[in-house]
Amino acid sequence: MDELKKCPYCGEEILPLAKKCKHCNEWLKKEVSSDNSNKKNQEETDDESLGFGGRMICSLILVGVGWALFYFGSWHLIFGKKISIMLQYLSSGTLKMQNFILEDSGFVFRINEKYYGFVKDAHFFDSPFIQWAMLFISLCAFYYAIHNLIFGDE
């Protein structure tokens, strides 16, 4: 026979599987609440089991995918390049310093005296649509990698 346990209401001995006390007629609460809380805690830890290390790995994979799309989309970065007035005149048709230059080959913007942006090489794809689509997707991958690293999956 099973060991007996005490009723939490009247203190009489009852069977451990009893749902209702035969002495005081009180319904016994199952220990389900603790089981549910354990399950909820386990689900929360499963959701966040990646932690910072897992988020870092996922972010690095996303950066790798973004870089591959960026590179094979025939783009390269311009960081701090000085563009002469003559080259700006040839590209825009005006002799004043441009804050933003948008051409078929890409776009650059000016911060102080140097230009930053993206320029196409066309060494993998000749289709501008594919190049711009790959640039957009790679920028989204970079953004999501940074967001995932900082905030995690919310």
Image (cartoon, rainbow, N blue to C red):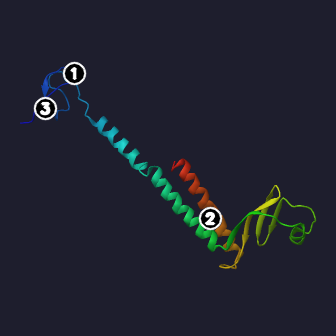
Label whose residue precedes the other's in the sequence (1 or 3): 1
Q: Amino acid at mark 2?
A: Ser
Label whose residue precedes the other's in the sequence (2 or 1): 1
Q: Which mark is residue 44?
A: none
In percent of width and height, residue 139 lies at: 64, 61
In percent of width and height, residue 106 lies at: 76, 69
What residue is shown at x 51% (from left), y 49% (from top)? 152
**Do callouts 1 and 3 mark residues in contact (Cβ within 8 Å)?**
no
Mark toward the viewer: 2 or 3: 2
Mark toward the viewer: 2 or 1: 2
Q: Which mark is residue 9?
A: 1
Q: Is residue 35 above or below residue 73?
A: above
Q: Which residue is mark 2?
A: 138
Q: CA distance from mark 1 to mark 3?
A: 14 Å
Q: Secondary structure at mark 2?
A: helix
What residue is shown at x 91% (from left), y 69% (from top)? 93
Q: Residues within 10 Å of mark 2 (few under 14, many from 20)?
A: many
Q: Which residue is mark 3?
A: 15
Quarter of the view holding residue 62: bottom right
In percent of width and height, residue 26 lies at: 22, 24
Q: CA distance from mark 2 to mark 3?
A: 64 Å
Report whether 94 appears left or right of 142: right
In percent of width and height, residue 76 lies at: 69, 69
Q: Residues within 10 Å of mark 1 (few under 14, many from 20)?
A: few
Q: Is residue 143 above or below residue 25?
A: below
What residue is shown at x 12% (from left), y 25% (from top)? 13
Q: Amino acid at mark 3?
A: Leu
